[in-house]
Image (cartoon, rainbow, N blue to C red):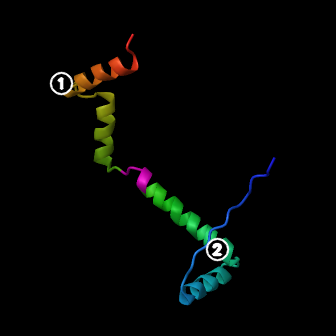
Amino acid sequence: MAKSLKTERIEARVEPSVRKLIVAAAQLEGRSVSEFLVASAKERAEAALYRQTVIRLTAEDQLRFAEAILDPPPLNDAMHEALALHEQLIDPS
């Protein structure tokens, strides 16, 4: 049985000035270029995912959201139809 790799390789082509910048920054932090690039890319990836998955609400919006959950408005006709269709498709018994 083949062993799974613990790491994977990522390659990128950069202009010489960008490479110099990265090397200088890595040296300042006492890291290898690979360590610096991985840490930087991971940080940026986590930040990008966070921005797309977390909803930030003002205090007023938080209150309205909580009130809507605790005391939801009555269902309108479209919601009743959607609920009936859902029950037919999911639990047709």
Percent from the top left, x then y, of residue 83? 29, 22
Residue farthest to the front, as pictured: 1
Q: Is residue 2 magenta?
A: no
Task: Judge whether 66 appears above or below 19 on screen.
Answer: above
- Give the residue at the far right of this rendering: 1
* Horizontal and vertical percent position of residue 8: 68, 62
Note whether 37 is above or below 76 in the view shown.
below
Chief SS of the magenta region? loop
Gap between marks 2 and 1 measured at Cα: 57 Å
Q: Quadrant of residue 25?
A: bottom right
- Between 81 and 13, the one nearer to me in the picture: 13
Q: Which residue is mark 2?
A: 36
What's the amino acid at mark 2? Answer: Phe
Q: In the image shown, does 21 or 91 lie closer to the viewer?
A: 91
Which label was assigned to residue 93? none
Q: Which residues are magenta?
A: 52-56
- Residue at x 33% of width, y 18% of height: 88
Mark 1, Cα crowd under 10 Å, few <14 / some 14-19 / many 20+, is few
Toward the viewer: 45 or 63? 45
Foreground label between 2 and 1 = 1
> What amino acid is at disc 1?
Asp
Residue 15 rendering spot, x and y as whole percentages:
54, 86
Residue visible at 42% across and 50% down?
54
**Local SS, label 2:** helix
- The quadrant holding residue 52 is bottom left
The residue that label 1 is drawn on is 77
Q: Residue lying at the far left in this picture: please name it.
A: 77
